[in-house]
Amino acid sequence: MSESAEVGTAAGAGPTDTDWAAALAAVRGLPADARVQLICHVNPDGDALGTMLGFGLGLRRLGVRQLRATFPGPPVLPEPFRWLPGLELLVGQDDAYPEPDLVICFDVASESRLGDLADRLDKAGTALVLDHHASNTRFGDLHLVDPHAAATSVVAQELLDRLGVPLDAEIATCFYVALSTDTGSFRFEATTPAVHRLAARLLATGIRPGDISRRIFDTRPFGAVRLFGEVMLRARLEPAAAAGRGLVWTYATREDLARHDQPAYVLEALIDSVRCTAEADVSCVVKQVDAAEWAVSLRSKGAVDVSAVAVALGGGGHRFAAGFTGRGTVDEVVDRIRGELAGALLPG
């Protein structure tokens, strides 16, 4: 969801001058015929996809011609992002450069989030990672990882600034989608004065924030509306969980999606409907991926570090927004979450 002294590898530290210099050299030193492969994480959200496409457009402005962007898994984009500038850069994972000169990863905290594309890290001449997750494992060769940045787009825009790429409406549209997505439309704790200053720069290019917000936050098929209603009826409130701070959770199955003829990505917005529960600090949505596999989204209002919960269960994220892949029955997955909550309380 992402601001920086010598090696930026200490927990909580951002990129150092040395890190920025290495990243700049990697991009500026590309030969004219260099193949550059951009990769974001599986099931891309607005920050991952918007940052990757916006940065790709910036590289085009620099004169990079052999440039492809992709993400692991089926090449299906969520409907809210199918209008973004730069979509012509996207290819399916099978069409990614097999041995690129430079790989740049966006919003990816660990190699596991690269799926079948993780092998490009070893096959590339250089692998550069742009991210804002405190749980980033520092995979790859070069790292611009800023755990204080509100979104990976903050890091990407600074790199474009240092490269001397002027900000235009197409790049700004992509970065605004990224920034507004990871700040919850500028409602989350990560919304700092610096975030608003960057948003002001993006808006100054002439983009229309109302249109963008309607497309990414306020538009969904009627089938998804019906699906949300059904899944919300299952929501359970556990006031005693998290040492009395409260937990609210629900789940959705593949059968639910099939019954309402909806793709899996529509469930990504469901957590926002659950997290508004006044009696619970922690909210959770458990989404079925396979027979005994579940994608889990966690949110906190400030009393619990849900990234600690997610990391303990094999995932990662931020203090107030995190996730992991759970296995077993839905009740077994939620029981493991309960077991970690009390140990993840924040001071105060």
Image (spheres, rainbow, N blue to C red):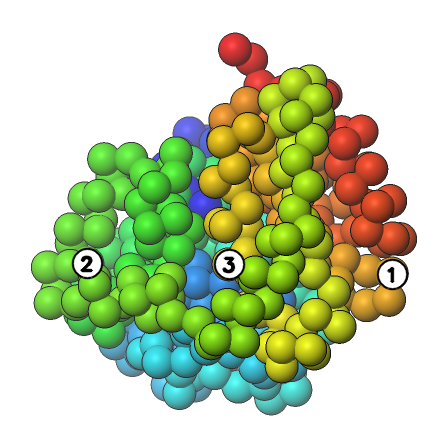
Q: Answer yes or no: do the residues labelled 2 and 3 have beta carbons within 8 Å?
A: no
Q: Is residue 164 left or right of residue 250?
A: left
Q: Is residue 31 above or below residue 333?
A: below
Q: Which residue is mark 3?
A: 269
Q: Nearer the viewer, mark 1 or mark 2?
A: 1
**What SS does tag 1 mark?**
loop
Image quadrant holding the N terminus, namely top left
Is 12 above or below relative to 139?
A: above
Question: Which residue has dot 2 on it?
Answer: 202
**What residue is disc 1 on?**
292
Q: Which residue type carries mark 3?
A: Ala
* Mark 2 residue element: helix
Q: Work out which residue is located at the far top of the displayed protein and give it.
A: 348
- Per the model, the C-alpha gap separating discs 2 and 3 is 24 Å
Inspect this view and state whether residue 335 appears. Answer: yes
Which quadrant would residue 50 be assigned to in this image? bottom left
Q: Position of residue 151 (x, y in %)?
A: 40, 49
Q: CA distance from mark 1 to mark 3?
A: 22 Å
Q: Of the residues under marks 2 and 3, which one precedes in the sequence? A: 2
Q: How far, Cα to Cα, is label 1 from label 2?
A: 43 Å
> What percent of the width, then of the height, locates residue 255?
75, 72
Q: Residue at x 70, y 70 (%)?
A: 256
Q: Residue at x 45, y 68 (%)?
A: 49
